Amino acid sequence: MIDKHLTMIEDAAKKNVQILCLQELFYGPYFCAEQKTKWYAMVERIPDGTTTKLMQEVAKKFNMVLVVPIYEEEFTGVYYNTAAVIDADGKYLGKYRKHHIPHCDPGFWEKFYFKPGNLGFPVFKTAYADIGVYICYDRHFPEGARILGLNGAEIIFNPSATVAGLSEYLWELEQPAHAVANGYFVGAINRVGREAPWNIGEFYGKSYFCTPRGKILAQASRDKDELVVADLNLDEIQEVRNVWQFFRDRRPEEYGAISAVNK
């Protein structure tokens, strides 16, 4: 899987890609389809693990910002679904840990593998744009998407592994809605095909970029591996926010119920 992605990253460099995000848990199968302790062997430290170090070299070689989703080990027995962010000069900028962890049938047994994220909603100032990360199931929760906007994100990347029949009808609805509500670009990434032996369903692909107006700029097919490339005009963020003053007109003093602990 790493070799396959290295080839795709090289193809991206030939197309002058400046920022690239890989799929969720990119260097292996979506093993959360079952609950087996053998998959704990997939964990790596960030930034000291071999995959992060390799991608730092790749980022520097191609002068490309990389978002690298990894099964992270904080220490023995404490693991997270994480994305490392690497700047175009190869510098490790930090990481985002997935906050919302599903545990449901068919085959999304993530609480067996991951603790909920505890690093907040960081925005990373890269050579080309200020970017945030929101991983897969996170996208169903607008609160973090709003915080990323308030923290200054210009582009949000959402690496995912999700199957048809479960969330496909939401795929082109929720994330353009986040883009509109917060005035930023979104890059949505999903796997393709079926993964044996579990065959929990078809990973339907359809990765895309959308604008702060919710318009899909570029989109992949549902049934083959593809590199999705789009030119994002960051000036559009200011243009949209000049019209739709959602951040100005917020009423956070009235939203206490959102953060109240359920009893």
Image (cartoon, rainbow, N blue to C red):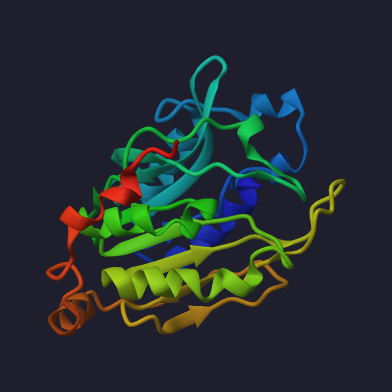
Residue 71, image x and y in percent? 55, 35
Count of numbered circles on the image: 0
Residue 184, image x and y in percent? 29, 70
Q: Is residue 229 visible?
A: no
Q: Residue furthest right?
A: 197
**Could you tell me which residue is drawn at 49 percent across and 65 percent down?**
188
**Could you tell me which residue is drawn at 84 percent across and 53 percent down?**
199
**Could you tell me which residue is drawn at 56 percent across and 50 percent down?**
24
Where, quadrant-wise, is the C terminus in this rendering?
Answer: top left
The one nearer the camera, 16 or 129, is: 129
Residue 87, image x and y in percent? 30, 48
The one nearer the camera, 79 or 66, is: 79
Residue 148, image x and y in percent? 29, 55
Judge left or right: residue 194 versus residue 146.
right
Judge left or right: residue 140 versus residue 151.
right
Rendered position, 131 above or below 237: above
Rendered position, 190 above or below 89: below
Judge left or right: residue 256 versus residue 247.
right
The one nearer the camera, 12 or 187, is: 187
Q: Is residue 20 visible?
A: yes
Q: Residue furthest front?
A: 263
- The quarter of the displayed image where residue 212 is located: bottom left
